[in-house]
Image (cartoon, helix red, strand yellow):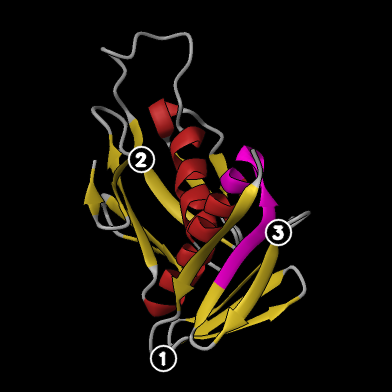
Amino acid sequence: MKKELSQRIEIPEGVNVTIEGARVVAEGKEGKNEREFNLASLDLKKKDNAIVIGSKKSSKNEKRRMNTIAAHIKNLIQGVQEKFEYKLKICFSHFPITVEAKGNEALIKNFLGEKTPRKAKIPSYDNHIFFKDVITVTASNIETAGQAAANLETATRISNKDRRVFQDGIFITSKCGEEI
């Protein structure tokens, strides 16, 4: 059964949101985020100090897409208010691992005693800070911060060995302030 549905997202103080067709641009004190959405049969409008996503005749699919777009827009707004932060821990038992940044790559040296360093791609517009055993990745876009953290973690994945014995690697310890 099709019916009229809409969802309203409030825009907080200090955040400027503009809508250009299917593209949403949010600007705040931490920078600028933008994203283009596949609206298909949905309407995206800015009314007063809120964003309204809706459809005159919506089914389950439109409702799902509406909720997904609303979640993405909330992340855009939250990212320009305060940056998303991921913390990763460098763990090793015998061979000391060193991590250094070169451009948009991180080089992981001496992992399990390997001679060639492993590489992990890091998006260039992220801030990343390397300490002795903790890596902090911050970005105003949750997707780029999460992807950079995931790339660092998967670069040190160990295959064909017993995970109970070989526990070396880089592991995510907190996502956006939540301990894992």
The answer to which image quadrant residue 138 occupies is: bottom left
Image depth: mark 2 or mark 1 in front: 1
Asked whether 58 falls inside the magenta stretch, the response is yes
Q: Which of marks 3 and 2 is nearer the N terminus?
A: 3
| Residue 45 location (% of width, % of height) | 65, 76
Residue highlighted by disc 2 = 97
At x 24% / y 51%, what residue is drawn?
A: 178
Q: Cβ–Cβ below 8 Å for labels 3 and 2?
A: no
Q: Earlier in the sequence, mark 1 or mark 3?
A: 1
Q: Please name the amino acid that badge 2 sits on.
A: Ile
Image depth: mark 1 or mark 3 in front: 3
Asked whether 160 falls inside the magenta stretch, the response is no
| Residue 166 location (% of width, % of height) | 31, 17
Classify mark 3: helix, strand or loop. Answer: loop
Range drawn in magenta: 52-64
Q: In this view, does 50 lie above or below 152?
A: below
Classify mark 1: helix, strand or loop. Answer: loop
Q: Distance between the residues labelled 3 and 2?
A: 50 Å
Q: Please name the amino acid that badge 1 sits on.
A: Gly
Q: Please name the amino acid that badge 3 sits on.
A: Leu
At x 41% / y 70%, what residue is drawn?
A: 78
**Viewer-proximal residue, 141 or 15?**
15
Residue highlighted by disc 1 = 14
Residue highlighted by disc 3 = 42
Q: In this view, does 80 lie above or below 109?
A: below
Residue 114 seen? yes
